[in-house]
Image (cartoon, helix red, strand yellow):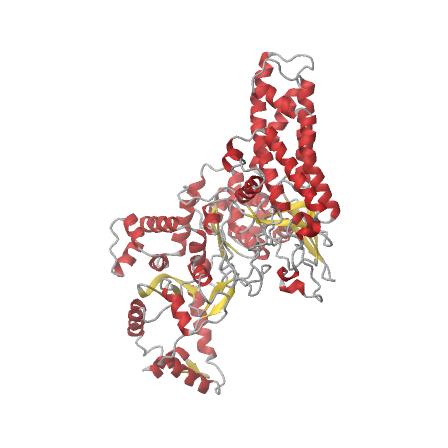
Amino acid sequence: MEAQLASFLAMWAGAELLVDPIESDLDGFRNNISAEVKRGRIKYPWIYGRKLYDEIAESSFHGSGHLNHADTLQLLGGLPQGVFQLGPYVCGPYGLVESRTWRNIPPTVEIPGHHCSELDCDRIHGVLLTTGDTGVSKARSLIGKKLSKVTGEPTDILDEVADFQASHIPTFSWSDSGSLPFFLFECLSEKDLRRLLVGLLAVSKGSLRGECEQLGLTIGNASNFASSVNDAQLLQIFLLARDSEIHECLNRLIWDDEIKIEPGETRVPRIVRRGFGSLNISMEGSRLGVRCKPPASFVPVRLRQLIYSCFPGTESKVDDRLKWPLRGYEGDSAAAKLTNALAAEAPVALVKRLIVGEERACTVALDKLGLPSGAFQSATDDEIAELITWHLGFDSLKRDVELHTLLEYLGSLRKLIGSLPAAFIDKTDISRIRQLSSDLFVSLEESLKRIICFIAWVTLRDHYAESYDLSYSKNEAKEYFVDWMASRNPSFTLEHFDNKLPLGEILSCFGTVAKAMKEAIANRESYRRDLSEWPRAMRDPSSPFRFPFQYRVPLLDLDNTAASFISDLVAKVPSSLQAAGVLDVRNGFLHHRDEVPDTARISSALEAIDARLAELIGNGLYPLIYTLESAESDSTGRRKVVLDSRGGPKVVLTRPSPIELAGMPPTSDPHIVVVRATLRDSGEPLRFDFQVDSEYTDRWRGFPRRPVKKGLPKFGQSGDGGS
């Protein structure tokens, strides 16, 4: 029996098949395997979400790359049964069942295991599991030795199998579902997953209910049923549904805010980040829904294909229909014009002009992307164009709403003051100024609090300590700053900062931070990081790479000019605003005093606010989001990368860089650039991954978890240099 099973697993010997696919009792074989999987005699690893990662981090073998059989059993014993799918067959806690959709999510013995102890390494290292010695494994070993002496393959049969598989799983599909389980369990909460199951049971017209009932499950009330199943059961049921059903249900739940994703947030898998299939597709989620995203280099190809699919007909008819809207571009044919348009025009503008403006083309485009056209009858052309381009895989510049609102209030008040007589302001004008002043100063105070938190977090927090975290979020920066201030003034609490911090105290915080910066510069050597804490690749004297974080206070890692400039600018904010009478103007209008500042005083205060904001924004001391605008390379290996934001200056990075291995965020991802904070000897500014504060980021707190280096103190034990 063991030899027969081993032969079945080997499949062929040279050009000869060891298994007769016609005469074999595949149903009986499947039923036997299914029974063994249900009983747990065959155990698969659960590799989705954080459970496996955290289980390894808590174990005695954290950091190991190969587990023995005892450790393998210990690890898998604390996890749900693994769920995988090959073709139509889905294995899991319900055994081996057939799905209506073919997928390629193969089982594996090499699992995504852990981060290593080198803090600059962001790769999740694989861990190899060990199967115990069984009669089948011994037979497979003997057969393997014999087959190693046989040459050739049954190429004709293999070609037929490949063609058969391609008919069910298209080779070049923009919606490969290999990343589906990783997206579901890394990007959605337990409640979200159960909402998805309830939605699928409601919208799949009874088909998924029927699939579940064939497994012997009684659904009854969908919500009660969804709350009764564990993660493994949940996933195996999901894989019985069609990809289009899952995709549409997720989109509707997100659009209806039943799955809440914060504005500006893009959820991506954190552990298994690779793409799947021939086109390397990965799934992502935002307030616009869920998308299957190919690598950036394939996205324009996808847009081109979508445009042509929206205009069916003969080649000459398509050519005639596209030539006119593309008439501004060079080329004798529509194809040539479209090539030039794709190279020069913003994708969202091109989509708006070619697709959104024509109802039939727009309906086709939405259908190709799995988006119900009927859901967007009240949407504007701009909204639909943004939706289509995002689902194709493009990212757009993100506007900072808080900053945009502040600048609008500032502009409106300056315009009003400029229209009034200098000598006298009547009661009607005072009322209008009071309203605008209230809006402006409330917005200004919130923005200044965000700015000082960001500046202190960037320049004083030891980002390399503990986990080497180069990720910024508004709440994390605020928590750091409040703790930092509380270490100097115990009465400074989070509640005080959120609710009772007037403009005068906010400005004094700038002075406190500026003083700490200057003290750090004066005592530089006391903050130097021990060489043993440097990354392995950079502590070797022969390494061509530089370690940019040689101090526990990041301000000291900047070149001297940048460090002095930033500390001077931070000190300048309170002194210049106070000198311009900003506090008097604020108090004069917000406290409803009988005497109000004259227009000259107000203008002076507004000019000072405008000037300081422009300096802070222009030097990257406001956390604006930057995205990749362009990248150029030459034959010598040099590259020039241009980053852009909505509101800040463009940033040009040159490659190669001596800090290439420092773990800075990829230039392809949206991130924060501190423009003026140029690191010593590299000329490159500090950059941070951007995180939106949400339930999703809360669930990923404490990630990554690294094994402690033996023989070295745990990073951070000697104290945070910024404190």
**Percent of width and height locating residue 335:** 61, 53
Q: Number of marks in the image? A: 0
Res 52 visible: yes
The structure residue drawn at horizontal position 59% and vertical position 16%, both measured from the top left corner, is: 430
Would you identify the image quadrant in which residue 534 lies? bottom right
The structure residue drawn at horizontal position 31% and vertical position 66%, both measured from the top left corner, is: 95
Determine whether, in the image, residue 75 is placed left or right of residue 603: left
Res 326 visible: no
Determine whether, in the image, residue 495 is placed left or right of residue 524: left
**Percent of width and height locating residue 369:** 47, 51
**Percent of width and height locating residue 72:** 41, 70
**Of residues 290 and 450, which is closer to you in this image?**
450
**Percent of width and height locating residue 68:** 44, 74
Q: Is residue 454 above or below residue 441?
A: below
Determine whether, in the image, residue 689 is placed left or right of residue 209: right
Determine whether, in the image, residue 641 is placed left or right of residue 114: right
**Of residues 670 and 393, which is closer to you in this image?**
670
User: Which corner quadrant holds the N terminus?
Assistant: bottom left
